[in-house]
Image (spheres, rainbow, N blue to C red):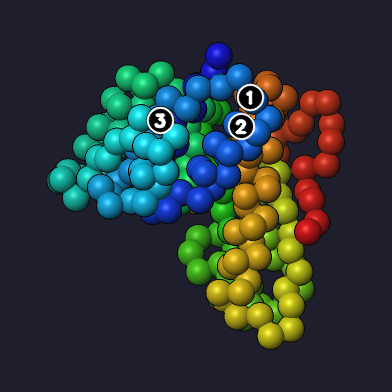
Amino acid sequence: MQSIVTLISGRGTNFEAIVKTAQKEQWPVQFAGVIANRAAAAGLDFARSQGIPAFFIEHQDFATRELFDAALIEKIDELGADLVVLAGFMRILTPHFIRHYAGRLINIHPALLPAFPGLHTHERALEAGVTEHGATVHFVTEGVDEGPIICQASVPVLAGDNADTLAARVLAAEHQIYPRAVKWFLDGRLRIEGKQAKLFPEEPQLIKL
């Protein structure tokens, strides 16, 4: 049975969506632990309610990002992660960390990459006047939001949208595609080819909502 360790900073709603989907579909998976970089992260309470080991490693307790990441690696490896899932983990990871988990570290980004990498994606999408926005699950590489794309969901940008209404629509899309991407990984269906993660057997990796 494969195991997942999830990193969060706040509510961890994508983590919650993954756990609930796994329970509903009876995945053969172990949620080995959740680690937050803030003791007050609300997602830790959800983990505890599900009997999932919950930990916090306060990044402020470390003098450098490298020391913090080293502590993260020690805990993740102790938990025996086959897959590391970033679910709203608001820390920039060091190249050493990313290389350590190459090919088994995934993230979700609130935009249709390669459009709008980085922060403030919803505001930037509205400013750009796009008619579609969305979310992307991707493998993490050293380039910011540049890793091979696993799957995406697009949502329409509606007249009268503001950053909050658009963000809510995108978050609902995230909750649909992140569990799907995790299951594909666990089932061994993904192959990284350049900047794309190909799915075997093939099925749509972009959904329109």
Residue found at x 66% / y 80%:
161
The tag earlier along the polypeptide, 3 or 1, is 1
Asked whether 52 or 84 is in front, the reply is 52
Which quadrant of the structure image shows residue 137? Answer: top right
On screen, residue 152 versus residue 186, left or right, reads right
Q: Are marks 3 and 1 in contact (CB under 8 Å)?
A: no
**Label 2: which secondary element:** helix
On screen, residue 205 versus residue 54, left or right, reads right
**Residue at the top extreme, as displayed:** 1
Q: Which residue is mark 3?
A: 51
Say if 90 sits above or below 116 in the image: above
Which amino acid lies under the numbered mark 1 shown in the image of this protein? Answer: Trp
Residue found at x 78% / y 59%:
209
The tag earlier along the polypeptide, 3 or 2, is 2
**Label 1: which secondary element:** loop
Q: Which residue is mark 1?
A: 27
Which amino acid lies under the numbered mark 3 shown in the image of this protein? Answer: Gly
Residue 189's disc is none
Q: Which residue is mark 2?
A: 22
> How far across and down, in percent of the image, does residue 49 sit?
40, 38
Quadrant where the N terminus sits is top right
**Spatial separation of the CA atoms under disc 1 and disc 2:** 5 Å
Q: Are marks 1 and 2 in contact (CB under 8 Å)?
A: yes
On screen, residue 42 versus residue 132, left or right, reads left
- Asked if residue 196 shows in the view, the reply is yes
